[in-house]
Image (tube, rainbow, N blue to C red):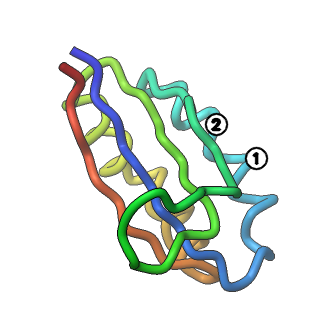
């Protein structure tokens, strides 16, 4: 059953994005992940919290694959790089 990691990211400095974008793709592929949503124009239709700068949804074949990607030691430096210029709320959910 597919699972999804959803990032709601607030970007404070774009300097990290080029390097992160270049390196994260092969690591996602290693774990069967693919980006299915990347939107910098989220629109509020309900609620009142601040909107993120970008919403990203990554699909994985299983929950275990999603966790393996996020916990992969190769991802740690990319995670740290992303955190130099952003903050994120990240959730893992399963499909129906």
Q: Label 2, secondary structure: give it.
A: helix
Q: Quadrant of residue 81?
A: bottom right
Of residues 56 and 49, which is closer to you in this image?
49
Q: What residue is pinned by disc 1?
A: 22
Is residue 82 left or right of 58 when viewed as pictured? Answer: right
Residue at (25, 42) in percent of width and height: 67
Residue at (74, 83) in percent of width and height: 13
State whether residue 87 is above or below residue 71: below
In the rendered view of the protein, which quadrant contains the N terminus? Answer: top left
Is residue 9 left or right of 31 when viewed as pictured? Answer: right
Q: Position of residue 8 (x, y in %)?
A: 47, 62
- Label 1 crowd bin: few (<14), some (14–19), many (20+), radius 10 Å: few
Residue at (37, 40) in percent of width and height: 69
Of residues 35 and 95, which is closer to you in this image?
95
Q: What residue is pinned by disc 2?
A: 25
Question: Pointer 2 and pointer 1: residues touching (CB < 8 Å)?
Answer: yes
State whether residue 18 is above or below residue 25: below
Q: Label 1, secondary structure: give it.
A: helix
User: What's the CA distance linking mark 2 and mark 1?
Assistant: 7 Å
Q: Position of residue 40 (x, y in %)?
A: 70, 57
In the rendered view of the protein, which quadrant contains the C terminus? Answer: top left
Q: Position of residue 3 (x, y in %)?
A: 28, 29
């Amino acid at each position: 059953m597919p699972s999804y990691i959803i990032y709601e990211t607030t970007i404070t400095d774009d300097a990290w994005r080029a390097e992160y974008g270049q390196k994260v793709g092969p690591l996602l592929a290693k774990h069967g992940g693919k980006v299915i949503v990347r939107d910098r124009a989220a629109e509020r239709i309900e609620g009142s919290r601040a909107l993120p700068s970008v919403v990203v949804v990554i699909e994985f074949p299983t929950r275990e694959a999603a966790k393996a990607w996020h916990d992969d030691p190769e991802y740690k430096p990319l995670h740290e790089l992303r955190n130099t210029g952003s903050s994120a709320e990240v959730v893992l959910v399963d499909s129906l």
